[in-house]
């Protein structure tokens, strides 16, 4: 919620501890996924297509949502033009030995321009309703000591572009990780 919305909660009879702002939409989606093993390689890929439209059954302020939350500020018209998001990923896992695996992957998504007025058809960082994309590349190494205990390290580079980057201070990021895991 914005600071102004939080300030207005007491006058509306709502508490900041269980109140949310919400964007309501009707969504249609389908996904295709594949996994193919050709030892010592395992290939995987996927695609998801999601379309967001304004709801056929709009909600009103004060709607009681799951978990005891109240929707005090509701937008039922964020998608006057449908928003289409296409998500895709692919990668390969290489089993060097029974204990050591290497994985490299690519992930991405693209959204269309779904704004209205001056934002219609835009492809710029100025508005989140402009078309834009996200992409990420990752690599990791996983060493299994036994069936319950393993150690891993990896890194992911990601970047956002145009409308998807709206509001970001930095549009690229590198996330390293290292850890150990015990599975029961």
Image: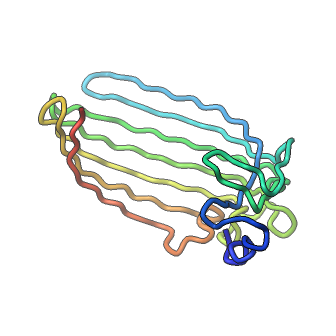
Q: Is residue 96 left or right of residue 92?
A: left
Where is the C terminus found, in terms of image quarters?
A: top left
Against 149, is 25 above or below?
Answer: below
The residue lying furthest to the left in this view is 145
Give the position of the N terminus as an image quadrant. bottom right
The answer to whether residue 142 is above or below residue 41 is below
To which quarter of the image does residue 168 belong? bottom right
From the top left corner, tell me how far across and down residue 3 is, in percent: 67, 77
In the rendered view, does 93 fall on the left or right side of 16? left
* Rendering coords of residue 143 (x, y %): 17, 40
Residue in the image at 34% along x and 28% along y: 42
Residue 21, image x, y percentages = 70, 61
Identify which residue is drawn at 21% across, 39% down: 182
Nearest the viewer among 153 and 102 is: 153
Q: How many marks?
A: 0
Kindly identify the residue that appears in the image at 76 percent across and 47 percent down.
Answer: 25
Which of the colour schemes (rainbow, by chain, secondary structure, one colour) is used?
Answer: rainbow
Horizontal side of 176 relative to 76 (left or right) equals: left
Dividing the picture into quadrants, the one containing residue 116 is bottom right
Q: Closest to the observer: 145 or 2?
A: 2
102 displayed left or right of 133: left
Q: Nearer the viewer, residue 135 or 51?
A: 51
The picture places residue 115, in percent across and down from the top left corner, at 79, 61
Q: Nearer the viewer, residue 143 or 6?
A: 6
């Amino acid at each position: 919620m914005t600071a102004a919305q939080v300030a207005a909660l007491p006058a509306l009879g709502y508490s900041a501890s269980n109140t949310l702002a919400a964007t309501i939409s009707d969504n249609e989606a389908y996904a295709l996924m594949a996994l193919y093993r050709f030892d010592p390689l395992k290939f995987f890929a996927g695609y998801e297509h999601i379309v967001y439209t304004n709801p056929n059954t709009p909600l009103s302020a004060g709607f009681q949502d799951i978990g005891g939350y109240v929707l005090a500020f509701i937008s039922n018209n964020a998608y006057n033009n449908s928003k289409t998001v296409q998500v895709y990923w692919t990668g390969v896992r290489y089993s060097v030995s029974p204990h050591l695996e290497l994985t490299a992957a690519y992930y991405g998504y693209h959204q269309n321009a779904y704004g209205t007025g001056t934002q219609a058809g835009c492809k710029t960082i100025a508005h989140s309703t402009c078309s834009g994309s996200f992409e990420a590349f990752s690599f990791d190494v996983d060493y299994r000591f036994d069936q319950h205990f393993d150690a891993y390290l990896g890194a992911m580079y990601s970047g956002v572009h145009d409308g998807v980057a709206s509001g970001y201070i930095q549009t690229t990021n590198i996330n390293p990780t290292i850890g150990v895991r015990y599975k029961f």
